[in-house]
């Protein structure tokens, strides 16, 4: 029997035998949302929609893809997306499924469940990216209903892009995001570690100080560093000491190379080149509607481009193409890191212009294995 009830999380999911699998473990599906808001995506999101279709199509080579869409865009999305992609009405304020979607948990008895975090649009009224976020907040509730799974309610404000796990007890995150006063001012690092362990079934938290330079999420780890296998991470990197990203990546590398994971292993750190630096062009900024309460896009602003922001599917890795001078090098590295998967590059500047990338717009639903 399935249980799609909300749970007060006492005892917490970890104590009940649930944990979050790694992204590189098998999936049943991938969830996405459809971009449309004109104050974030230029030209009424038309160019972004083309990029989202390419991402969904690439992932659909390896698993079922669901795309949630507001009713007023249903017909347009259905028309643009290939027939084998499942388009479902699922209202949202924007299109960042990594952050507003479920963090799925599995149990060794074959049950799937999810964590339902608090969400405040990356900082609430103190530096957040838009208001309101009421539709985003209901997405996990609706997906729990659709799938008929238990939803563990967490008191933590947390977005999915703020964490990565290896599925063997280790979680990486950044202080810049999780300890930011605009997320969880009432909890310190120790409280936070306890909650992460309780909700995700991890036992070791690796804290990196900062996320990518100028990342508007307050430093989500998924743009800086991710697990590519147990005991191995990919880190965005530049040798250019004059680039502000250098010091950020350098301090992260120092920590990653010294730390041991939950299994007592030293991490192997693979470096991915930094694209760019990439800045917003005048023609790109001018296509975004200026509305009060949303983040303005200014020509010349540096964007937080990173090849680490890729999605690991069952048989594919879908990576952002961002800069012709570095795309091939990044793709070659990813091909060597994922020899059993096809690495598909998707032009992703339009997604970056909206403030994130491929990992941020996707959320894997793990396969349950009894
Ligand atoms: O990168 C993400 N995980 C979300 C970015 C939100 C940007 C909103 N403009």
Image (tube, rainbow, N blue to C red):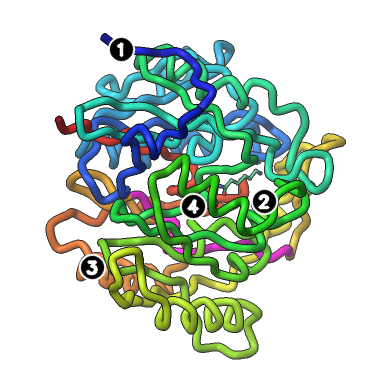
Left or right: where 360 falls relative to 337: right
Residue 281 in the image: above or below residue 350: below
As rendered, which of 322 and 246 lies closer to the eye?
A: 246
Read off the residue under disc 1. 2
Q: Nearer the viewer, mark 4 or mark 2?
A: 4
Pair 3/1: label in front:
1
Q: Main secondary structure of the magenta part?
A: loop
Other-residue count near label 1 (Cα within 10 Å), few / some / many at <14 / 14–19 / ≥20: few
Q: CA distance from mark 4 to mark 3?
A: 21 Å
Structural distance between the alpha carbons of marks 3 and 2: 34 Å
Q: CA distance from mark 3 to mark 1?
A: 37 Å
Q: Are marks 2 and 1 in contact (CB under 8 Å)?
A: no
Q: Residue at x 21, y 34 (%)?
A: 108
* Residue 272: x %, y % from top left: 39, 73
Q: Which residue is mark 4?
A: 163
Q: Mark 1 or mark 4, which is nearer the start of the sequence? A: 1
The residue pinned by badge 3 equals: 337
State yes or no: residue 55 in magenta: no
Q: Position of residue 52 (x, y in %)?
A: 44, 37
Q: Nearer the viewer, mark 2 or mark 1?
A: 1
**Residue 195 in the image: x percent, y percent?**
54, 45
Which label lies toward us, 4 or 1?
1
Q: Nearer the viewer, mark 3 or mark 2?
A: 3
Circles 4 and 2, Cβ within 8 Å, touching? The answer is no
- Helix, strand or loop at mark 1: loop
Q: Which residues are magenta?
A: 301-311
Lower sequence index among marks 2 and 1:
1
Depicted 195 relative to depicted 268: above or below: above
Picture quarter with the N terminus = top left
């Amino acid at each position: 029997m399935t249980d799609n009830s909300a749970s007060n999380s006492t005892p917490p999911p970890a104590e009940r035998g649930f944990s979050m699998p790694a992204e590189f473990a098998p999936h049943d599906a991938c969830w996405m949302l459809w971009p449309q808001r004109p104050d974030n995506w230029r030209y009424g999101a038309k160019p972004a929609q083309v990029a989202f279709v390419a991402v969904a199509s690439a992932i659909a080579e390896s698993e079922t893809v669901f795309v949630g869409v507001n009713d007023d865009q249903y017909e347009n999305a259905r028309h643009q997306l290939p027939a084998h992609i499942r388009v479902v009405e699922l209202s949202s304020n924007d299109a960042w499924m990594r952050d507003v979607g479920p963090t799925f948990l599995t149990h060794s008895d074959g049950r799937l469940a999810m964590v339902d975090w608090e969400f405040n649009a990356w900082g609430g009224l103190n530096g957040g990216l838009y208001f309101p976020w009421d539709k985003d907040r209901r997405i996990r509730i609706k997906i729990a209903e659709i799938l008929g799974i238990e939803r563990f309610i967490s008191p933590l404000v947390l977005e999915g892009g703020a964490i990565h796990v290896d599925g063997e007890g280790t979680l990486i995150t950044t202080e810049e995001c999780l300890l930011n006063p605009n997320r969880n001012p009432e909890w310190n690092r120790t409280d936070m570690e306890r909650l992460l362990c309780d909700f995700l079934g991890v036992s070791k938290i690796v804290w990196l100080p900062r996320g990518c330079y100028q990342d508007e999420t307050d430093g989500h780890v998924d743009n800086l560093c991710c697990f590519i296998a147990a005991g191995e991470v990919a880190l965005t990197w530049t040798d250019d000491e004059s680039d502000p990203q250098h010091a950020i990546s350098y301090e992260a590398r120092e920590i990653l190379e010294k730390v041991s994971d939950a299994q007592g292993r030293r991490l192997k750190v693979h470096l991915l080149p930094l694209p760019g630096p990439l800045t917003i062009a005048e023609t790109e900024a001018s296509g975004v509607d200026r509305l009060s309460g949303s983040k303005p896009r200014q020509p010349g602003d540096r964007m937080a481009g990173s090849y680490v922001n890729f999605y690991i599917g069952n048989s594919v890795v879908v990576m952002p193409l961002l800069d012709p001078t570095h795309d091939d090098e990044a793709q070659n590295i990813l091909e060597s890191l994922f020899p059993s998967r096809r690495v598909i590059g998707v032009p992703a500047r339009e997604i970056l212009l909206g403030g994130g990338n491929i990992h941020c717009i996707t959320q894997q639903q793990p396969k349950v294995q009894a």
